[in-house]
Amino acid sequence: MRRTALLLLSAVTAASAVAAWAQAPLSAPASRAPHAAPELDCAACHKSSHVAVLGVYAGAAGRGAPPSPARMFELRVQCVACHTAPASVDAAGAALGETYRANDTACATCHGKRYDGLIERWRTTFAAMRETLATKLRGARAALGETAAHPGHGRARSLVADADFNVRLVSIGNGAHNPFYAANLLRRANGWLDDAVALVDKPAAKTADALMRGGYCATLCHEPAGVKTPAMARFAGKPFPHARHVAELGATCTTCHSADAHKAMAATASTCSACHHRAGNERCETCHRDQTAFYRGTARSALAPIRPNVMAEAVACTGCHDFSRPPSRASLATACTGCHERTYLPLLTEWTMGFGRDLSQAAEAVRAAEAVMTRMPAGDRSLVNAREILKEAREALALVRAGGVAHNPAAADALLQAVRDRTGRVQAGVGRR
């Protein structure tokens, strides 16, 4: 068995993980004696039928996805640890050799009863994924047959070949040997087939491919392992409705999480913008709470009252923010002319650049007051009052920065003026000593 395993592993020469596995010593299963020496070299005539299995298990035989060995491969779990059930019970097995199949009992031995049914779940899920891809492969091949003269035909044909390779590998190698890697191979095949038909200007086959696009994580592993989708999560320091993104908004696991590295986060600010900042989306206030509160006058400050922007009742966010264009000061200014005369165009520049100077002056006033406070005696009774003034000034300054001056210029002007006035009192109070 040792020599057979080594021969099989050496067939996957491109995989560094497989090479590492082949170089390490392998022990014979406890239930069987090792082959007698000298051993017959069966592989000289009989080609291995397990190369695809080993390639999937080692996570290095597919196309497009980085190497990702199965966790059990990394722990050096042998084939016979899972394949414990005889495929047949007749007497011929003793003379002809026996095939052993994986079963739930083997899973439960190490992982417990909660893994009951996992093998069957993997089998049916990968079968459903392959069936979806079979439909897309037929459509892509038909599209290639109709567009041989199209300039994108060569690249499209290459993508279809790569997709077909991954599908066959997962089918022959059995995705259950490495579900995370196998699902990633099928996900990439799905994307390649969509890209291929687009290259030759043909529509993609209509399929329910949410599972393929990244919904497989929960179906294959998280649900049977009891991993719950949290109602809320945090990203970039802000809370967001995690479960709602999945259940209602159509996000799949790999929309945000890496398909190449388990548990890694792949989302960036642009990932969010791709959905939230697209034309037609008017649910800005769900995420931009600070700007909304400042615009609608619901924010609060101890330094000055914050009244709503005069446009708050009549103009929604998308009245100024046109997501069909690249965001810029010029495009925002142009939006003003939809309701106002062109004389309003310089206003946005004044609100952004002019108030930039006011923000800097207010921040400098806070820093100057902080420096003055360091010279106040520890027992000075006015020190408590000075600290409270500075606390309110810092909060007002942060509110203006987070809310955005252009969302409420009148409130921003009042707050920044109040910051300068209040911090000036701290400096003046010490100056009289």
Image: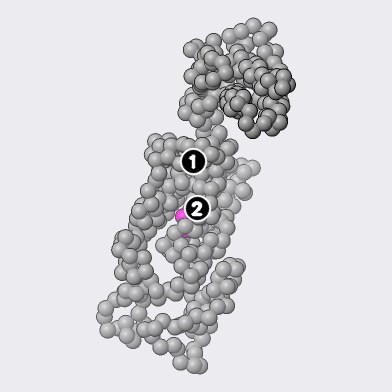
Q: Nearer the viewer, mark 1 or mark 2?
A: 1
Say which amino acid is labelled 1: Arg
Residue at 54 percent across and 24 percent down: it is 291
Q: Residues within 10 Å of mark 2 (few under 14, many from 20)?
A: few
**Which mark is drawn over residue 285?**
none
Say which amino acid is labelled 2: Lys
Q: Is residue 70 above or below residue 136?
A: below
The percent coordinates of residue 418 (x first, y second) are 62, 17
- Report the magenta residues as a range: 182-186
Residue at 39 percent across and 74 percent down: it is 81
Is 221 displayed left or right of 421 in the figure? left
- Residue 351 in magenta stretch: no
Residue on which the image places disc 1: 234
- Residue 184 in magenta stretch: yes
Question: How far, Cα to Cα, is label 1 from label 2?
Answer: 15 Å
Residue on which the image places disc 2: 263
The percent coordinates of residue 235 (x first, y second) are 52, 40
Quarter location, residue 321: top right
Q: Residue furthest left?
A: 90
The percent coordinates of residue 242 (x first, y second) are 43, 40
Instruction: State the residue in front, 279 or 395.
Output: 395
